[in-house]
């Protein structure tokens, strides 16, 4: 801490519209490390509970990494113009919360529970999801939480981190975590004397993204403009002009009303490739589907039907009914379902420094499906037609001119970026797919090997799935569903979906 505080410089980082629009959300992931020396009976040089991934090394490496990510110690503020910014004041730092604690639980107990974070002695629900004020930082919004849990008998460690989405997206999150691990490992290997790390220049200045946007005046479609600027009215304006602390409390109240479960489905790489190959055979000439295209098409049918079957029970509950009424949802699709696919733009940017940009650089490919499409059987020809919709939606979302014009529109008025955030959080007629298989989650080696398991923490809002990499020794992917419990129940009763699945875990 002292090293960071003595080196950090005061600065103001003006947020981009994509940062501000992601305010209600956070990125929270747990990395589980098993001490195999204690579980296999092998010899180990570790003699105390701190020797496996030593506490002092992790903490020193954390603050060293923080020097490259000063935005994590800033305070979110709103200018008179309504634009948001993060102020890093070296004399009044808004530090992330960092703790390292021991648990009276064996690592094996948690692994047998499906790595259920709700069995931990600390309720992470209060820290996950919506960034809210906390007495831990004097009533300001906590930019991030970093929790280290050490399990009984030196059996393992959980590294859990939850960061506000306005600071960085999932890619930037994984960059911070990997840098932290890389730093700790270098310190371990040099007996706590840091060896030189690969020099990287992480970019937090949002003008990088603004400069990427095209200055061409390609017009947005009327529907795109309508979806952003219309329907929000006074409510979006009110949200935009509220203080970040008050806005956080409102979104947190909404998230607490959500009925949600966490379920995990493992699907092998071979199963996914076989499905893609079959559907590819029905593709239009010159079109090549990715696994993500095909899997999302499959989810349109099985998730759409699961949500529709659950809709009567869900819709009659008073709190969701109120939320639906309040949202005045012009972005929703009452005749079917809106699917949203998060897309990391960095690989698509022709700039050598794009991968070093830590602000939000994600676009959303959206497409509407009708009830008739949802009720189709997932035959290869049907999946091909849906996969083409997914493919085209992602292509549109990554169009440089479109991104530029949409960015300018969202930046033009504070409420323009708040209304999509509100609808994203409250609409029940949407489903979000986030593929993180290319994020280097299993590259995080603090000096004791890579994680045994990587899983998201509690989530604030429902109706989304994370497609996550599985452990390299096992392969395949894990579909992490954050959905209402009755939707999950319908999913596991759907034989078409469960035939793809090798393993299933769930906890509420």
Image (cartoon, rainbow, N blue to C red):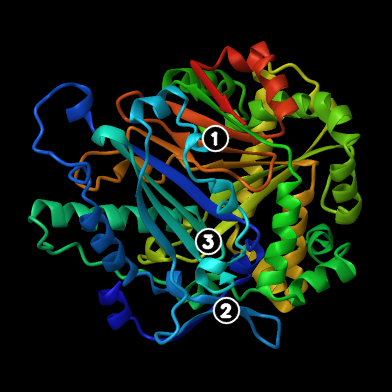
> Which residue does the numbered mark 3 point to in the structure image?
361
Q: Which disc is residue 85 wearing?
A: 2
Q: Nearer the viewer, mark 2 or mark 1?
A: 2
Q: Which disc is residue 292 wearing?
A: 1
Residue 170 drawn at (x, y percent): 49, 53
Count neighbours of disc 3 (C-alpha within 10 A) and say few if under 14, some if 14 to 19, many if 20 or more.
many
The C terminus: image quadrant: top right
Which quadrant would residue 216 be assigned to in this image? bottom right
Q: Assign a secondary structure to mark 1.
A: helix
Q: Compute the Cα span from label 2 to label 1.
A: 34 Å
| Rendered view: 345 above or below 109 | below
Q: Assign a secondary structure to mark 2.
A: strand
Q: Which disc is residue 36 wearing?
A: none
| Rendered view: 438 above or below 420 | above
Count neighbours of disc 2 (C-alpha within 10 A) and say few if under 14, some if 14 to 19, many if 20 or more.
many
In the picture provided, is 440 more to the left or to the right than 294? left
Q: Compute the Cα span from label 3 to label 1.
A: 19 Å
Residue 357 drawn at (x, y percent): 42, 66
Q: Nearer the viewer, residue 477 or 48?
A: 48
The disc, 3 or 1, on the residue closer to the chain's N-terminal end is 1
| Rendered view: 279 above or below 389 | above
Count neighbours of disc 1 (C-alpha within 10 A) and say few if under 14, some if 14 to 19, many if 20 or more.
some
Which quadrant would residue 72 be assigned to in this image? bottom left
The N terminus: image quadrant: bottom left
């Amino acid at each position: 801490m002292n090293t960071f505080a003595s080196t950090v410089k005061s600065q103001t980082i003006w947020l981009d519209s994509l940062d501000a629009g992601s305010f209600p959300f956070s990125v929270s992931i747990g990395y589980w490390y098993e001490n195999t020396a204690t579980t296999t009976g092998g010899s180990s040089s570790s003699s105390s509970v701190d020797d496996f991934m030593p506490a002092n090394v992790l903490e020193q490496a954390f603050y060293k990494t923080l020097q490259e990510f000063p935005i994590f110690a800033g305070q979110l503020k709103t200018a008179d113009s309504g634009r948001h910014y993060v102020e890093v004041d070296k004399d009044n730092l808004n530090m992330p919360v960092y703790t390292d604690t021991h648990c009276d639980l064996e690592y094996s107990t948690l692994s047998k529970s499906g790595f259920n974070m709700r069995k931990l002695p600390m309720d992470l629900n209060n820290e996950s999801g919506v960034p809210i004020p906390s007495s831990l930082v004097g009533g300001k919004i906590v930019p991030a939480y970093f929790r280290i849990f050490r399990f009984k008998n030196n059996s393992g460690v959980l590294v859990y981190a939850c960061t506000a989405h306005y600071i960085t997206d999932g890619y930037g999150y994984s960059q911070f975590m990997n840098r932290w691990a890389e730093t700790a490992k270098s310190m371990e290997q040099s007996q706590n004397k840091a060896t030189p790390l690969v020099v990287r220049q992480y970019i937090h200045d949002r003008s990088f993204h603004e400069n990427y946007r095209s200055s061409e005046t390609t017009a947005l479609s009327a529907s795109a403009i309508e979806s952003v600027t219309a329907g929000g009215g006074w409510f979006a304006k009110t949200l935009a002009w509220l203080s970040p602390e008050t806005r956080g409390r409102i979104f947190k109240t909404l998230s607490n009303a959500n009925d949600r479960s966490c379920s995990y489905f493992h699907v092998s790489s071979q199963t996914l490739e076989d499905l893609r190959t079959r559907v590819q055979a029905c593709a239009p000439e010159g079109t090549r589907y990715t696994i993500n295209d095909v899997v999302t098409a499959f989810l349109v049918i099985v998730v759409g039907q699961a949500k529709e079957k659950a809709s009567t029970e869900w819709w009659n509950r008073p709190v969701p009914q109120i939320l639906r009424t309040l949202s005045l949802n012009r972005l929703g699709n009452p005749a079917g379902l809106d699917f949203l696919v998060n897309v990391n733009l960095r690989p698509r940017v022709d700039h050598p420094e794009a991968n070093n940009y830590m602000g939000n650089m994600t676009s959303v490919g959206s497409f509407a499906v009708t009830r008739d499409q949802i009720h189709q059987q997932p035959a290869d020809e049907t999946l091909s037609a849906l996969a083409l919709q997914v493919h085209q939606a992602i292509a549109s979302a990554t169009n440089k001119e479109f991104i530029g014009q949409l960015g300018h529109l969202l930046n033009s008025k504070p409420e323009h970026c708040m209304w999509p955030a509100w609808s994203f959080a409250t609409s029940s007629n949407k489903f979000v797919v986030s593929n993180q298989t290319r994020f280097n989650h299993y590259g995080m080696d603090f000096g004791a090997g890579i994680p045994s398991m990587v899983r998201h923490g509690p989530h604030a809002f429902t109706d989304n799935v994370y497609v996550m990499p599985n452990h390299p020794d096992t392969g395949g992917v894990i579909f992490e569903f954050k959905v209402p419990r009755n939707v999950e129940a319908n999913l596991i009763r759907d034989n078409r979906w469960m035939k793809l699945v090798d393993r299933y875990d769930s906890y509420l």
